[in-house]
Amino acid sequence: MNARSKNSAAESTDESFAATPLPSHRIKQKRGRKTYDALIATGFKLLEEKEFESISIAELARAAGYSVGAFYARFYSKDEFFDAMVSHYLAQRQETQRRIIGSEPIDLVVAKLIENIVTYYWNHRRFWRAALMRSIRDESFWEPIGVSSHNASTLLIERICRHIGRQLSEEEENNLRFAFQVVYGTINNAIINRPGPVFIGQVEFIDNLTLAFFRVSEYEKLGIEPVVGKKKIRGP
């Protein structure tokens, strides 16, 4: 499958998810939206201190300054509330990744992107751990997150193509997409299992993961000398 057909597949997947009504789409009044946003923000705040499964709806509503009835007026269940948190996460992450990929120097863009990804997931590790646990019991839950990851890799591929002045070969593109898969898989494992010898939350973790991306993707063969830390990775 070439880049164009992959992009079309991602766009059609985006459309299929957009066709599913989100709780925010049911809110018509400004006051209702304010309560909705406050509950979402409170959910992320509570996740800084405790796991999602241990947060009750009553606790969430109370911390946000609303009643349990106000919660159920906007969300049918705790699962739907978490879906709304994921939707909020996807919108923010897509905008951040688009900005980084579009504005950072080509030799720094991968390092900056991976630093941002690792830092975000570490700072929101309880949210991400809840997402991973939810995906185990609901396979379809992960689909929009997968689409978001695919779109991020597509943005980077497009940036690289513009810089080198040609389209990537199928092998080059597959290497880059697999490198992204390695990055996300390593982060997920680090959050769930915390294997050593380098742990997420350490600077060394970001540098080693960035280096792994370059090695897996064979990035230097594209004629770009990327940076890890303060060191350039020389091409062949």
Image (tube, helix red, strand yellow):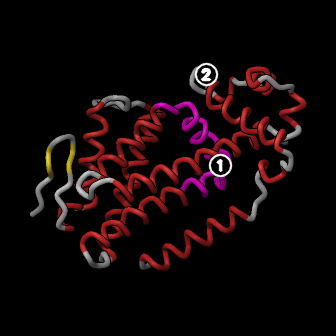
Q: Tag 2, which secondary structure?
A: loop
Q: Tag 1, which secondary structure?
A: helix
- Disc 2 marks which amino acid? Lys
Circles 1, 2 touching at the beta carbon (< 8 Å): no
* Residue denoted by label 1: 87
Which residue, as the protein is rendered here, is positioned at the far front?
30
Left or right of residue 145, residue 198 in this image: left
Task: Kindly report the distance in space between the C-alpha atoms of the residues bearing marks 1 and 2.
Answer: 21 Å
- Residue at image x 62%, y 46%? 135
Q: Quadrant of the N terminus?
A: bottom left
Point out the tag, 1 or 2, that comes first from the N-terminus.
2
Decide whether residue 143 is among the magenta residues.
Answer: yes
**In the figure, 98 relative to 33: above or below?**
below
- Coordinates of residue 95 in the picture (x, y in percent): 51, 53
Dot label at residue 50:
2
Q: Which residues are magenta?
A: 123-146
